[in-house]
Image (cartoon, coloured by chain):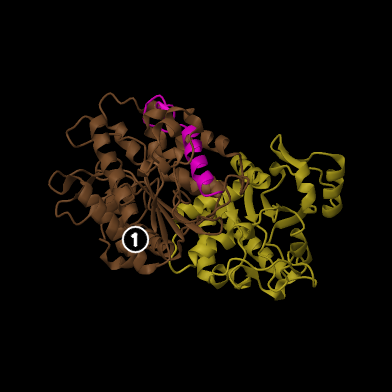
Amino acid sequence: MTRKVILFGDSHLAALKLATGRIAPPEGWEVSFWGTAGTRFRNISWRDGCICPDDTATEQAFARFSGEGITRLDPAEYDAVVFVGARIRPGAILPDILNHVAHPTRHLTREYIGLVLAEHLLRHSTYQMAAAMAAGGKTKVYLNPISFETAGKQPRPRAYKVAREATHDHVSEIWRLTERLLAEDGITLIAQPVETIVEGYYTDARFGVGQKDHVHKNAEYGALILERIFDALSQKTKTAIRKAS
Amino acid sequence: MAETSHPYATLAPDAFWRSAVAERDAMEITGLWKPKFPITQDMRIVTAGSCFAQHISRAVQERGFNWYNAETAPGSAELARRYNYGVFSFRTGNIYTTRMLNQWFRWARRPDDCPDIYWTSDLGFQDPFRPNIEPDGFATLSEARASRRAVLAAVGDAMRKADIFVFTLGLTECWRSADGQIEFAACPGTSAGHFDPVEHVFHNMGFKDVTRELSRALANLRAVNKRVKILLTVSPVPLTATASGQHVLTATSHSKAILRAAAGTIAAEHEDVDYFPSYEIITHPVWGGRFYAENRRSVLPEGVAFVMDQFFAAIGAEAAAAPKQKPRRATMTADTDDLVCEEEMLAAFAPNSTRGAS
């Protein structure tokens, strides 16, 4: 039986799309994409248990990217939905958290960090859509948030001096807390691999694109994420098989 | 006719009750405070003390002054405040007594002297020296310890970096360990912990106690920061409850009289210590109790605004800076009930509690 996964997101989907030739999906899985540039995300909403464009222009914008004539995302049609990027940017809050966590004399309790992360996530309508979709129980929901900015390409002066000394262990701890939070909403986190992170809260320049683009990532990075997504789907398949037997 | 030659003859109008008070509308009384030293917007202001000191923290920030937050936190201002970040310059919670202030300053300088004691409850672990600082308690002892180390580091940082240290004296009544070595932030068993009549002893600080502990606290402060100036105030908020055996009203008068005298005495003895009369402005009969809420305890936003207007006028900052965020009065109106005040917890234990009004 063919299983269907849809990767839904903003321009950060591009890296994954570019990598599709490099990584094969798990056996029996069919992959499709539905997304558009982030600005159009202002014009989508959660209606009747689906993610729907609010106007024709947005519908067309999504159709252009997916090329598959999908006009809305109905979770009932998929075995898994992966939110990719989708305007959810840990880089907006993690440097400040890491600036405290990596500081030699400061301390934030895990509970407090969890609340800061939750507060940040819940500000995003796309996160609320993911949570609503997971709560609906019709599909399995995954979230791969936007990666950190690319090292060496920042247009602004760097802030958060202490956070730049944060280790992979520090970031891993934040990912674990995020994973737990998402799990409470029925969502599985596909986090940025810590081995792609440098200088505390930047993405290694080898995963960057273009000279002036400090945001998007290349196919190599996309392949790393796809690999994790497919691993997670494989786990889901194994679990389903175990349950069936 | 002989020339007038006595000292009163040349005094300014504000030295005479008739011209300074009786012949004026109460709301037009000015010049209540003549600052000993300048306070400018670029100076780092550190605030600590009882509930009322929180108003000073907010007001100086809203006027664009350089309020120093030595213990910052990520997240929204609302979330941070709920977890007691940004209430004072460090996350000690309210410091009601001069002994408690000295205790924090001493431990900040010598963290190993800070006793490694914590209370346990259904909420996990609580810090006896700031029992409500983590609203749901610390999940583990190691987190409670790490947080204690962080606050001591922050107190030490603020002590070293302060240009102006503002401290509001709140109470004389306190609870200590039986050997008198440790003072708790509140009576154990009220907002946190369990009361043990053998281990926990009531103490009502007298004038000598208050001045001695305040002097020691300031000595600890000056030991790490020679240039710091100190501004003392006394909280006009009456006691929620007294364990002294007196009526709470007379106990309040007793405590506040001691605190006011101690603050005035220390200020008079030191050039770099000043006293700002927020206590008088709120409590004095001239204003007829108009700044108190119906419970005759909580200070109304207009009272806080009047106090702070006097403060900023005296330091020449009336028009120095527009409020950075929302209009001040509106902010205070909205947030008055949110002041973090462990002492309020006592009211919950009072017989026939009527704390709803506060």
**Residue found farthest to the bottom:** A206
Residue B290 seen in the current view: yes
Q: Colour of chain B?
A: brown
Q: Is residue B285 left or right of residue A226?
A: left
Q: Is residue B32 magenta?
A: no
The answer to whether B276 is drawn above or below residue B146 in the figure is above
Of residues A214 and A75, the one drawn nearer to the viewer in this rendering: A214
Q: Which residue is mark 1?
A: B145
Of residues B210 and A111, the one drawn nearer to the viewer in this rendering: B210
Q: Residue at x 18, y 32 (%)?
A: B246
The answer to whether B247 is drawn above or below residue A225 in the figure is above
Locate residue B130, reporting x and y percent: 34, 50
Q: Label 1 is placed on what type of residue?
A: Arg
Q: Quadrant of residue B281?
A: top left
Q: Which residues are magenta?
A: B287-316
Q: Residue at x 34, y 58 (%)?
A: B270
| Chain letter, colour yellow | A
What secondary structure is marked by label 1?
Answer: helix
Locate residue B311, reporting x and y percent: 49, 44
Q: Quadrant of residue A147?
A: bottom right
Instruction: Report how many numbered discs are placed on residues in the image.
Output: 1
Of residues B11 and B223, the one drawn nearer to the viewer in this rendering: B11
Locate residue A124, reporting x and y percent: 65, 47
